[in-house]
Image (tube, rainbow, N blue to C red):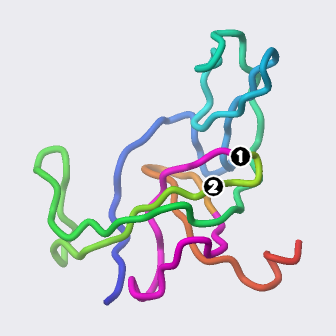
């Protein structure tokens, strides 16, 4: 079963040209995504930080029915089920992302993924062997 590329909206501070932009607290060192001005743990100031964008699948689910419309707008070919997951990055941050895979049966907890930001929700795809070595 093929996954679909479903457009969704998210925080505009995550732009494709800038990669995954998180924030790190200058007091307690907690890192968050998307970037926040203040730390959610201690309330102290948080500074912008570029996140590596590679990690492993922490958990996932499949969206098997079309979301309510509006705000969802079905693609021209109609709704196709797609996977959503949390990817745990090297910075110990979990990022919600649409999982871009050809076959939903290939999804496994712990699989290595690369996450990118852009318009809409971040997207995750399996990493290549070369990306895993770097």
Whether tag 2 and tag 1 are in contact, CB under 8 A, the answer is yes
Quadrant of residue 116 within the rendered picture:
bottom right
Say if the magenta span includes residue 102: yes
Quadrant of residue 78 within the rendered picture:
bottom left
* Residue reaching furthest to the top: 44
Name the residue nearer the viewer: 87 or 59.
Answer: 59
In the picture, measured across the screen, residue 129 lies left or right of residue 104, that is right
Mark 2 surroundings: few (<14), some (14-19) or many (≥20) residues within 10 A: many
At horizontal 55% and vertical 66% (from top left) the residue drawn is 124
Quadrant the N terminus occupies: bottom left
Residue 18: % across, % down: 70, 45
Q: Disc 2 and disc 1: Cα gap in Å?
A: 6 Å
Q: Give the labeled residue for mark 1.
A: 92
Residue 63: % across, % down: 26, 66
Residue 66: % across, % down: 15, 63
Q: Which mark is residue 81?
A: none
Residue 51: % across, % down: 74, 46
Quadrant the C terminus occupies: bottom right
In the picture, measured across the screen, residue 119 lies left or right of residue 39, that is left
Element type where label 1 sits in the image: loop
- Span shown in magenta: 92-114
At horizontal 55% and vertical 49% (from top left) the residue drawn is 95
At horizontal 18% and vertical 63% (from top left) the residue drawn is 74
Q: Give the labeled residue for mark 2.
A: 88
Quadrant of residue 39 within the rendered picture:
top right
At horizontal 47% and vertical 36% (from top left) the residue drawn is 11
Give above or below for 101 relative to 76: below
Give above or below for 16 relative to 30: below
Say if the magenta span includes residue 84: no
């Amino acid at each position: 079963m093929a996954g679909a590329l479903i457009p969704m909206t998210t925080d505009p501070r995550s732009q494709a040209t800038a990669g995954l932009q998180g924030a790190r607290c200058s007091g307690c060192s907690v890192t968050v995504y998307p970037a926040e001005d203040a730390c959610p743990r201690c309330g102290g100031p948080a500074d912008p930080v570029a996140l590596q964008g590679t990690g492993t699948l922490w958990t996932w689910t499949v969206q098997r029915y079309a979301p309510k419309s509006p705000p969802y707008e079905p693609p021209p070919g109609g709704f196709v089920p797609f996977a959503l997951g949390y990817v745990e990055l090297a910075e110990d941050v979990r990022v919600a992302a649409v999982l871009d895979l050809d076959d939903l049966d290939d999804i496994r907890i712990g699989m290595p993924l690369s996450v990118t930001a852009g318009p809409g929700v971040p997207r995750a795809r399996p990493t290549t062997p070369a990306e895993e070595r770097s």
